Image (cartoon, rainbow, N blue to C red):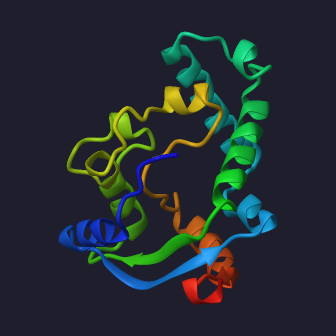
Amino acid sequence: MPRLVKIEEIITHIFKNDFRIREMRWVVLKKREAENLYDNGPDWLHTVGNKIIKNCQEAGVRPEELLKTNNPLELGQLVTKWNVEYLTKRPLPVMEIIGSNGNVVQEFRDFLGPTDPSKAPKHTLRGHHAINGETGAKATLEQRVIYNTAHASDSPEAAVREKKILWAAQIWSPYNE
């Protein structure tokens, strides 16, 4: 389990980089909500599957030996399974981020840095809050998601879809437990 980053550190980093939080809440996702959070279309699955193949190469293993397949589509489906397991395990903080320029989705993705925190520059959110030793290759070897601090929508259309799912999810409060 990764070292938990204090949410206050993340929020402070967001504000220091001229982004604002329009709305924030903690949610608990059901399996179906987590399954629909990502695109999961063939293009997305192939892209993610090819990243798994690259992670295996970096780790010096063959995907078919570790994961029983080297088919990018099947590997993308495996990542979807890992995402669902992770996203439904505990309450998640979710935020709607606003920026000062026209393309907040791309601006915020640039601010986050690469998905693999070991490749994220230190000034990015993922680079600054990276878990020591976390890499895409390590996550693949351990057959789990990459612990990379945050997720951001990859397009304005994805942001609309994801907000609809996240804002309809059950709100979590420690007082509900």
Decide which of 88, 106 is in the foreground and name it.
88
Decide which of 155, 62 is in the foreground and name it.
62
Q: Position of residue 27 (x, y in %)?
A: 61, 77
Instruction: Identify the residue at image location x=69%, y=41%.
Output: 79
Q: Position of residue 114 (x, y in %)?
A: 39, 43
Q: Position of residue 123 (x, y in %)?
A: 20, 50
Instruction: Identify the residue at image location x=44%, y=32%.
Output: 135
> Where, quadrant-wise, is the C terminus in this rendering?
bottom right
Q: Is residue 100 above or below residue 137?
A: below
Q: Is residue 156 above or below residue 80?
A: below
Q: Position of residue 134 (x, y in %)?
A: 42, 35
Please tell me in which quadrant of the rendered image residue 131 appears. Answer: top left
Please tell me in which quadrant of the rendered image residue 11 appears. Answer: bottom left
Instruction: Identify the residue at image location x=65%, y=11%.
Output: 62
Instruction: Identify the residue at image location x=69%, y=56%.
Output: 39
Given the current orientation, which residue lies at the most extreme bottom position? Answer: 175
Q: Is residue 138 above or below residue 24?
A: above
- How many discs mark residues in the rendered view? 0
Classify residue 40 as left or right of residue 100.
right
